[in-house]
Structures are given as structure tokens and as C-alpha cells.
Image (cartoon, grey):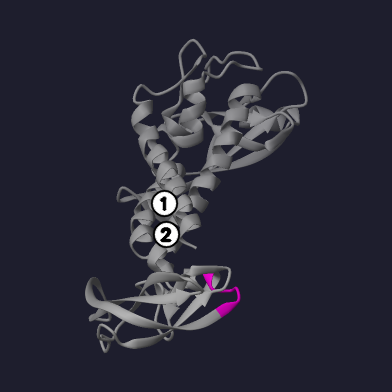
Amino acid sequence: MARDIKLDDAPREVPFRAQLAVLFGGVTQQIGWGFVLFGLLFGWIFGLNSEALTLIEFRGELGLTDGAVVAVYETAASENKRSIYGVRYRYPIGEATHVGVSYGLSNNFSPGQAVKVQYLVNRPDRSRIEGMRVRRFGAFAIFPMLFPLVGLGLAIRGLFGGLLVRRLLKIGRLAFGRLVHKAETNTRVNKQTVYKLTFEFSVPKGAKLFGYREAAEQGADVYQVHHKTHQTIELEDEPEEPLLFDPDNPHRAYPIDGLPGQVTVSAAGHIEAPPGLLKGLILPALSMLGLAAFVIALWFSI
């Protein structure tokens, strides 16, 4: 992008589509929501069926009663190459008869066999055969939930970054910085190395904005901004790259050629959203819906 870039005066009108793009279309956002969606698949299979939830559910007062086995069956699940069996049973609480299912790795039960049943006093319909599990898998099965949690953390981090960029698009001032350092990181995106680029730019005490070299002559303050990306070509094609910085805090800045969500600034100085915006919003939308459904299912399972 040339040194004579134009930009509307602040405060600027940022199109709603462009705001969506910077908030949800960044690489960090896409990776984060991808982790969420991928992790939720395992969360539905394992997390909701983990005995770790039983530790939470069965914190109340427990009662003990006699019950009888109704049926024993082999489930489609296994643990350490051993089949998990379900044992259906019935038990009386007062005048009511309840039916429950407990799980374990043993099939040493037969219909009609007497069993001891633990139940929640405040929810007598929630129970387990003494020594067995309420859910199919052991407590270890909760660990796949780390994937959506990590993804959600990345997505939230990307969202805060998007909020900063949205603010800069609205009220940011234009400056020009030179690339002073480029370093590889241990991260790769689409098999491409992510680099950490460091730009230095000046914020003069006067009204005019200078480049880095002019800043030294005019006594302007010089700041640095760090930017991580796997797409460095657009950020290395000019001696000085255009940046937007926060006039209230120049340490908060962002290179225009690296705006998240492929947001661009037109030749006329207008902020424009990418043409394929909706495609970039599919993953966050699906992940949010899946996360909401999972939270509801989790709420009703304990």
C-alpha cells in the first residue's frame, strides 16, 4: 500500500459487515472456533457420559434401598478394550417404583438378582447400583472437554483483538512504520510458518504525521507494534507500512495490510468488508450454536 494512502477522517463509519469480519473473521478466531466445534464432537460422546459429572451430581444426601435387576446388556462402548455393560434395575422409594441404569465392566448380573441401590434423597429418580457408574465412561472421559475450552479461549482472545481493531478503524490515526525485526515462531497455519513482525512508527508532537526517519529529525515519539501472521508478503512490500494507532494510547496499533477478516481500505479511503464474508462466519455460528446446545444438554444431565 502506497505512502499516499487515503483514509476518511475519524470518527469513521465502519460498515456492519466489516465489523463482523474483524470480530469473527480473524485467523485466531477461526482456529479457536474450529477447536470448539471439533472438541464438542468428543464432548457429546464422552464428556456428557463421563462419571466426573456424577461427582458433581451426587454431592447431596444419599439414600440406600434394595432393588432388583431387570436386564443386562452389552453397550457399543468399550474401555481399555473391555466392553461396557449396562444393568437396568428397578427400586422402590415410598409408594413409587423407579427404574435406572448403571454401567460397569462386569456382566456378573442376572435378571431378578437383588442389588443395593444408592439414590439422591432430593431426586430419588437419580440412582446407581452400589459400586457401579451412573454414566458409561469413567471420570477420565472428561478430558476431551479441554479441546473446546482451549478453542473458546482462543476465540475469546481473537474477539478482544477484533474489538481493538474495530476501535482503531473508527477512531485510529494513520501512521507509517518500518519493519525492524522479523522472527519465526513455533506456530504454523496451513503448513506455513507464522512470523512475528515488529514495526516502529512515530507519533509527532505536531499535527503532521512523519515516517520513521523524519521522526528522528522532528523529535517525535517512536513506538513499536508487534504483529503475528503467516501471510507476510503484504506487510513487506513497502519501505513503510501504513498503520492505525489509538491516539489515546499509541502502543495500541495495527497494520492496515494485516487487518483481520480480510477487511481492506479502498483507494477512496473507505473501509470495506470482504466479498466472501458469510463463508467466514459459518464456523463461528455453528460453533456457538453447538456450544449453546452442549451447555443446555449439560445442564439437564446433572
Q: Tell me which amino acid carries mark 2.
A: Phe
SS at mark 2 in the image: helix
Q: Residue at x 60, y 76 (%)?
A: 61
Residue 169 sits above or below residue 91 on the image: above
Q: Tell me which amino acid carries mark 1.
A: Val
Numbered mark located on residue 9 in the image = none
Q: Is residue 219 left or right of residue 127?
A: right
Q: Residue at x 37, y 53 (%)?
A: 188
Q: Residue at x 56, y 78 (%)?
A: 62
Q: Disc 1 and disc 2: Cα gap in Å?
A: 7 Å
Q: What percent of the width, then of the height, locates residue 195? A: 44, 48
Residue 283 sits above or below residue 113 on the image: above
Which of the two residues, 182 or 152, is positioned nearer the viewer here? 152
Numbered mark located on residue 147 in the image = 2
SS at mark 1 in the image: helix
Q: Which residues are magenta?
A: 57-62
Residue extending farthest top: 268
- Disc 1 marks which residue? 36
Q: What percent of the width, then of the height, locates residue 113? A: 30, 87
Residue 58 in the magenta stretch? The answer is: yes
Q: Main secondary structure of the magenta part?
A: loop
| Mark before the other along the chain sequence, 1 or 2 | 1
- Label 1: how many residues lie within 10 Å, few (<14), some (14-19) or many (20+)? many
Residue 73 in the magenta stretch? The answer is: no
Residue contact at pointers 1 and 2, CB within 8 angstroms: yes
Which of the two residues, 100 or 231, is positioned nearer the viewer here? 100
